[in-house]
Image: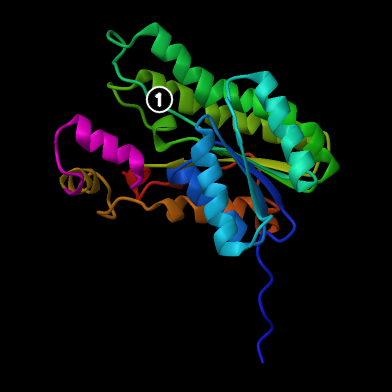
Amino acid sequence: MAKEREPRCAGKLALITGAAQGLGRAHATRLAEEGARVLCTDINGDGAAETASLIDEQLGSGTAFAIQHDVTDPQAWEAAVAAARDQMGGLNVLVNNAGIGVAGNIETCDFDDWKRCFAINVDSIFHGCQKALPLMREHAPGSIVNISSIAGLIASDTMPAYNASKASVWMLSKSIALHCAKNNMQIRCNSIHPTFVDTPILDGTAKNHNIEKGVLLEKLARQIPLKFVGEPNDIANAVVYLASDESKFMTGAELKLDGGISAM
């Protein structure tokens, strides 16, 4: 009789930002399915609580927890780390998933929007890692997973703020990785770079362009060599790998989950 497989993230204690919907909800769910306890955080506290409730319904009470969390606020990060300690008993996986895009090319982008994009996409990771690393060191080995974008590696003329912020996430991840390695923390840091993924964000995109979502998905798929748009679990499965000890020799790296776009 085959031995039952141990969950890939058994014993992991994970905090996931932007977990109210979409990719964040998928990350939290897949990590929990693979044995982790998860703290779901989001500026939308009700959405984070719904994610935690859905996970607990599926996997049992005490698997998931939730707090409202403004990732741009250092004090809110202190509260989030304290919640991880109090509710899960510690922290050894940090998934920096929260992020936004803003409109405008270099001539039309509003500077306040530019700053908001960097505050949520980049400053949040600075604050999160700075506040979380002391607790993560107590529960090492650990893993930091930063969700960047293929737009952090390939530029567009239409979204300088998003391009620049996600490129910053990419390089910041490498600096964090080297810092942790140099100081023998047993904490790794890597970035993930998705392209188009079928999440509620695309619902809003379709509405803003006054087209059916199916039509939008077809248009986006034509830009991808594999000819289809990603699903949330396509990204969440990579998060599971990076959170698990399967990736113990991987740090300062980037995973491109882009259907082949970056190969063109």
Read off the magenta span: 196-214
Q: Is residue 232 visible?
A: yes
Which residue sits at x=54%, y=34%? 45
The amino acid on which the numbered mark 1 sits, given as a three-letter code, is Asn
Q: Which corner quadrant of the image does residue 175 belong to? A: top right
Which residue sits at x=15%, y=43%? 212
Instruction: State the residue in front, 165 or 44.
Output: 44
Report if residue 77 lies within the magenta region.
no
Where, quadrant-wise, is the C terminus in this rendering? Answer: top left
Q: Is residue 121 above or below residue 258?
A: above
Task: Report whether 46 appears left or right of 3.
Answer: left
Q: Which corner quadrant of the image does residue 159 belong to? A: top left
Instruction: From the top left corner, tell me how far across and down residue 136 is, in percent.
Output: 78, 39
Colour pattern: rainbow
Instruction: From the top left corner, tell me how far across and down residue 116 is, in percent.
Output: 46, 16
Instruction: From the top left corner, tell me how far across and down residue 187 is, in percent.
Output: 75, 42
Task: Report whether 243 appears left or right of 228.
Answer: right
Report if residue 205 lies within the magenta region.
yes
- Residue positioned most to the bottom: 1
Which residue sits at x=56%, y=56%? 55
**Where does label 1 land, which residue?**
163
Q: Is residue 38 above or below residue 171?
A: below
Q: Secondary structure at mark 1?
A: helix
Q: Is residue 18 visible?
A: no
Q: Is residue 64 above or below residue 96?
A: below
Task: Report whether 118 appears left or right of 12.
Answer: left
